[in-house]
Image: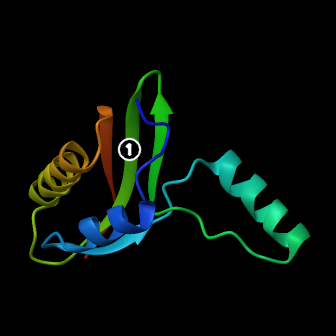
Amino acid sequence: MSDVLPSTDRLDQIVLAVPGVDGLYAATPLAATVIGTALGALVGRPAAPNSVFVARQNEALSVTVKIGVADGYAAADVCRRVYEALQNHLTESTEQQVAEIAVTVARIG
């Protein structure tokens, strides 16, 4: 099994391409965000929090994303499409199992 995690930049693009998604919000856990910000300040290179957070959970991947949903779209439908887009991409592009994909709506409209 590969130890390489999927590119979060590519996952961001996939999520933003889903109709009804009009924004991404930091999905990185708070502790990791604080540590990354502090380290970025020390080295003079601020760290951007990941919009799509990917972690290893046992032998599988765990993916978390927080989205904004545009006016005129049903949040549940958009979440379902985001889930399916991520699942399809990860199934096609990696040999790693996916344990969880969590899609959270951070804003509507």
- Residue lying at 38% horizontally and 44% vertically, measured from the top left: 63
Q: Quadrant of residue 72?
A: bottom left
* Numbered label tally: 1
Q: Is residue 3 visible?
A: yes
Residue at the extreme right: 42
Q: Along the horizontal axis of the image, is 51 left or right of 70?
A: right
Q: Along the horizontal axis of the image, is 50 left or right of 15?
A: right
- Residue lying at 18% horizontally and 48% vertically, measured from the top left: 92
Q: Along the horizontal axis of the image, is 109 left or right of 45?
A: left
Q: Is residue 106 visible?
A: no
Is 70 or 103 nearer to us in this picture?
103
The residue wearing badge 1 is: 63
Above or below: residue 33 compared with residue 24: above
Q: Position of residue 87 (x, y in %)?
A: 20, 46
- Residue lying at 27% horizontally and 73% vertically, measured from the top left: 16
**Residue type highlighted by circle 1:** Val
- Residue lying at 35% horizontally and 66% vertically, measured from the top left: 10
